[in-house]
Amino acid sequence: MATLHETVEVDVPVSTAYNQWTQFESFPEFMRGVESVEQIDETSLHFRTDIAGVRREYNAQITEQLPDRRIAWVSTDKPRNAGEVSFESLGPEHTRVTVALEWEPEGLVEKAGSAVHADSHQISADLKRFKQFIESRGIETGAWRSAVDHGEVEETEEEAGFAANAPAHHAHDSAAHASHAQPPHTPTPSPQRPAGVDPFIDDAEPSDPS
C-alpha cells in the first residue's frame, strides 16, 4: 500500500477552498487523469480515471465531511484507495490544503510508477492546478455545507441556524396548506452538488502550471 502526502497553499478563504472540494464532479477541471466523477447520492461517487494509459472505474464513499476542516473517503471496490483532504486557514485570504492518500498499485505500470514516485508527482501537479483554478476564479463553483460522520449525513449548526431564522408562514398560508401536512421533521436541504451550470467556467482547459 502506497502512502502519499502533498500540500499546497492557496490565496482564497478557507471556506472557498473547502466548498470547491465538495463539488466532486468538477474534479476533472484540475485533476489530470480523472475523466469524470458522478455524484450518485450525497455520499456516494463513481470515478472514471485514465492514468498512464490504465483506465479504471470504481465507486467511493464519503466517510467524513466537516465544513472548512476535512473531507475523507474510501473506495468500496478495486482499485483500493482511501484518503483525506484537510483545510487550514492561514489568514482571511490564505489557506493550506493537504492531501493524504493511501492506494494499492496494481499491475506493472502502476507499481513501476509508484516506485519512482510518479503518483506523488501527480498529486502535487493536481494541487498546483487546483491552486491555479480557484485563484483565477476567486470563487467556488458551488458548495455543500452538510456534515458527514461515518458515512451518514448530519445537519450542521450552520444549517440549523438557517432553518431557525427562516421566516414563518402567515396564518392564512398555514390554513390553506393544512391538508398537505409535512412530516414532523423535514431536514433543511443543502445546496445540491454539483451546483449546476456555472457561468464562470468556459470550455477551455486550465493551462498546466508545470
Image: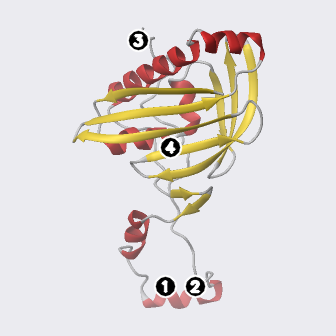
Q: CA distance from mark 1 to mark 4?
A: 36 Å
Judge the density around disc 2: few (<14), some (14-19), many (≥20) Cα neighbours within 10 Å: few
Q: Does label 1 or label 4 sit earlier along the sequence?
A: 4
Q: For mark 4, what is the residue? A: 22
The three-letter code of the residue at mark 2 reads His
**Residue drawn 60% across the image and 43% down it:** 73
Q: Does label 2 or label 4 sit earlier along the sequence?
A: 4
Protein image colouring: secondary structure
Q: Residue 82: give x, y in percent of width and height.
A: 62, 37
The three-letter code of the residue at mark 3 reads Pro
Q: For mark 1, what is the residue? A: 173
Q: Does label 4 or label 3 sit earlier along the sequence?
A: 4
Q: For mark 3, what is the residue? A: 209
* Kind of element beneath mark 4: loop
Q: Does label 2 or label 3 sit earlier along the sequence?
A: 2
Nearer to us of marks 1 and 4 is: 4
The three-letter code of the residue at mark 4 reads Thr
In the foreground, 78 or 171: 78
Judge the density around disc 1: few (<14), some (14-19), many (≥20) Cα neighbours within 10 Å: few
Q: Residue 14: give x, y in percent of width and height.
A: 33, 42
Q: Does label 1 or label 3 sit earlier along the sequence?
A: 1
* Kind of element beneath mark 2: loop
Q: CA distance from mark 2 to mark 3?
A: 56 Å
In the foreground, 180 or 2: 2
**Residue drawn 62% across the image and 85% down it:** 181
Tag 2 and tag 1, C-beta contact below 8 Å = yes
Q: CA distance from mark 2 to mark 1?
A: 6 Å
